[in-house]
Image (cartoon, rainbow, N blue to C red):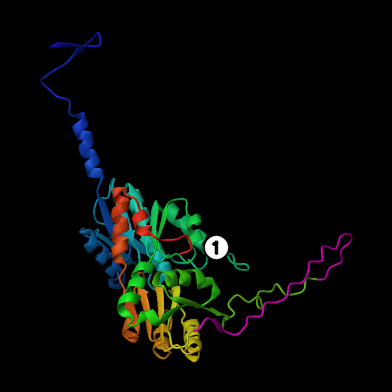
Amino acid sequence: MPIRRFGGHRSLVSHSQPPKLSYGYKKMNISRSGYRVFSANSTTACTELAKRITERLGVELGKSVVYQESNTETRVDVKESVRGQDIFIIQTIPRDVNTAIMELLVMAYALKTSCAKNIIGVIPYFPYSKQCKMRKRGSIVCKLLASMLAKAGLTHIITMDLHQKEIQGFFNFPVDNLRASPFLIQYIQEEIPDYRNAIIVAKSPSAAKRAQSYAERLRLGLAVMHGEAHHSESDMADGRQSPPLSRTTTGHTGLELPLMMAKEKPPITVVGDVGGRIAIIIDDIIDDVEDFVAAAEILKERGAYKIYIMATHGLLSADAPRLIEESAIDEVVVTNTVPHEVQKLQCPKIKTVDVSMILAEAIRRIHNGESMAYLFRNIAVDD
């Protein structure tokens, strides 16, 4: 065996068997670098978005079975190995939101116990996002859901247009809150004739920032509607106006706080001129449409000759399709973050914009470790 000298030391080198440890290590890294895309729902309407995303990525949808047993328990069977891989779970939220949440939790936990490297949830519409603030004696359900997802094994979330951007602070792992505004703005420019004669409308002052972003990008005017027809946040039935129980006390009787004047909501008014214009109402969620129908009637009275509604998430619950069809609304444009094919059959005014492109690109960039800044170019904090 030949002897070589390195810095005064002798080393034995064998030419019969070259070391192969490094090659085996590289091969192990290659096998761990794959990724799979699963759908956490087996219904046709909910897997449509997952199929669009996998087609854009050029991969096959992961083999799994999600079903309800006879006692309505959720069962998930993963039919292939996921060891050491990045797993993306696409979950669109149908009308049965609680079942969809359980499907996502059970699938995430199944993949976690199957030794997946990372589990990323692709949840375009994040459920319970409206319950992100303490209201009266309720609870912040959105925070509870964030904790449940982390406990089930999720390590990252991709979502779109959260109802409040501060929801990202509920999670102890990264959350990418994508925007649908580029696709909706493109629809306005390409599908609305004479959109230069349009005006962007905020249905309430709280939606003014989102509407202002659209108006600035389209170089259009802005109108804001003030006053609301519903009283969902009234304290009338809360019990806080009830007098305290009379009891005999000795000593300090407590502080006398100044009385607050009760809020009195004014009738709906429009700040801005919409006469002879196309009115485009901007919002993030359209669920119960009574407020939108009332706003459309006011805009018609003020002289708007066409009324469009642009929203990211089209939940369209209850009899929303019928109300839209019978209203002064000309068109409702939503994205495919939530399945709504049944509603479209009931109401031809509902149109869909596909956002699978940006979701697929987010998946590709996260897996490859690339920057997500490209997907947020020209996006301001208030958008």
Residue in the picture at 21% in, 29% down: 21
Residue in the picture at 37% in, 64% down: 74
As drawn, 195 above or below 4: below
Question: Visible in this render: residue 56?
Answer: yes
Position of 260 with respect to 161 (left or right) is right
Q: Nearer the viewer, residue 199 or 58?
A: 199
Position of 7 with respect to 252 (left or right) is left
- Residue positioned most to the right: 250
Q: Nearer the viewer, residue 261 or 318?
A: 261
For the N terminus, the quadrant is top left
Residue in the picture at 22% in, 36% down: 26
Where does the image place residue 217, in percent across and percent down from the top left?
40, 69
Q: Residues within 10 Å of mark 1 (few under 14, many from 20)?
A: some
Question: Visible in this render: residue 315?
Answer: no
- Residue positioned most to the left: 16
Where does the image place residue 96, in percent across and percent down from the top left?
40, 72
Per the image, the residue denoted by label 1 is: 140
Stretch in magenta: 246-273
Q: Is residue 138 magenta?
A: no
Where does the image place residue 129, in percent across and percent down from the top left?
48, 66
Position of 306 with respect to 361 (left or right) is right
Question: Which image quadrant for residue 152?
Answer: bottom left
Most common SS among magenta residues = loop
Question: Which image quadrant for residue 18?
Answer: top left
Where does the image place residue 227, in percent across and percent down from the top left?
58, 80
Q: Is residue 265 magenta?
A: yes
Instruction: Provide the secondary structure element on which disc 1 rests.
Output: loop
As drawn, 160 above or below 318: above
Position of 59 with respect to 316 (left or right) is left
Residue in the picture at 89% in, 61% down: 250
Q: Nearer the viewer, residue 171 or 381?
A: 381
Q: What amino acid does circle 1 point to? A: Ile
